[in-house]
């Protein structure tokens, strides 16, 4: 595809269809080699093409397989990160409330919320992310954070306020 070419919706759909027909089985086989779960590989194969369909104009490429593997690697990383969050949450839940049973639906809602928060935190500017993590996850006070990051307490308060606001706004 040429970057200066303007394609109609039908041409875009035909191009994506051709891309899918030519490379879907190869991408699935590639993901199966990388992952232990063939169901996850099938899901990521489909998700890769869905991502291309949803943002087709953003992708400029000469090598379709390079594009597909780049997108698939990103999706695989996100999947593994999500599974890690799920495992940590379920483990903490079992340790904290061994006598209580939480429904699968409640577990999934909490896991989904945690994953959304992780995405929000990852999108923060680096210093805000550091301040948020040190304060909320490591429990450091303003003075400790100021010393560790070599910034003023007023900067910490401002960064933490922005980070918390981003979390609250995104969760509404």
Image (tube, rainbow, N blue to C red):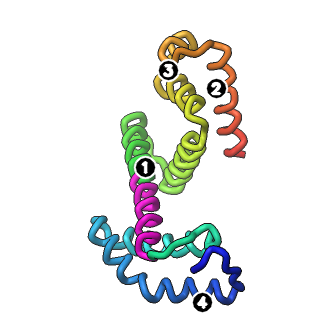
Name the residue at 67% across, 45% down: 171
Whole-percent x, y for residue 10 in the image: 68, 89
Badge 2 or badge 4: first in the primary sequence: 4
Badge 3 or badge 2: first in the primary sequence: 3
Badge 3 or badge 4: first in the primary sequence: 4
Q: Are marks 4 and 1 in contact (CB under 8 Å)?
A: no
Secondary element at tag 4: helix
Whole-percent x, y for residue 16 in the image: 56, 83
Q: Which residue is mark 3?
A: 139
Q: Which residue is mark 4?
A: 14
Distance from Cα at disc 2 to Cα at disc 4:
48 Å
| 116 relative position to 99: left or right | right
Q: Is residue 84 above or below residue 134?
A: below
Whole-percent x, y for residue 106 in the image: 54, 51
State which mark lies toward you, 4 or 1. 4
Distance from Cα at disc 3 to Cα at disc 4:
54 Å
**Residue 77 falls within the magenta-colored stretch:** yes
Badge 2 or badge 1: first in the primary sequence: 1
Q: Are marks 2 and 1 in contact (CB under 8 Å)?
A: no
| 69 relative position to 123: left or right | left
Q: Which residue is mark 2?
A: 160
């Amino acid at each position: 595809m040429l970057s200066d070419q303007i394609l109609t919706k039908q041409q875009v759909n035909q191009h994506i269809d051709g891309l899918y027909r030519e490379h879907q089985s190869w991408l699935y086989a590639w993901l199966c080699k990388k992952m232990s779960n063939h169901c996850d590989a099938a899901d990521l194969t489909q998700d890769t093409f869905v991502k291309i369909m949803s943002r087709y104009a953003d992708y400029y490429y000469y090598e379709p397989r390079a594009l597909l593997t780049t997108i698939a690697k990103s999706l695989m990383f996100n999947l593994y990160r999500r599974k890690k969050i799920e495992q940590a949450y379920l483990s903490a839940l079992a340790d904290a409330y061994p006598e209580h049973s939480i429904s699968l639906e409640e577990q999934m809602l909490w896991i989904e919320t945690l994953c959304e928060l992780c995405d929000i935190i990852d999108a923060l500017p680096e210093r805000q992310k550091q301040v948020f993590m040190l304060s909320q996850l490591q429990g450091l006070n303003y003075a400790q954070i100021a010393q560790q990051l070599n910034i003023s307490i007023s900067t910490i308060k401002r960064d933490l306020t922005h980070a918390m606001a981003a979390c609250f706004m995104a969760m509404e």
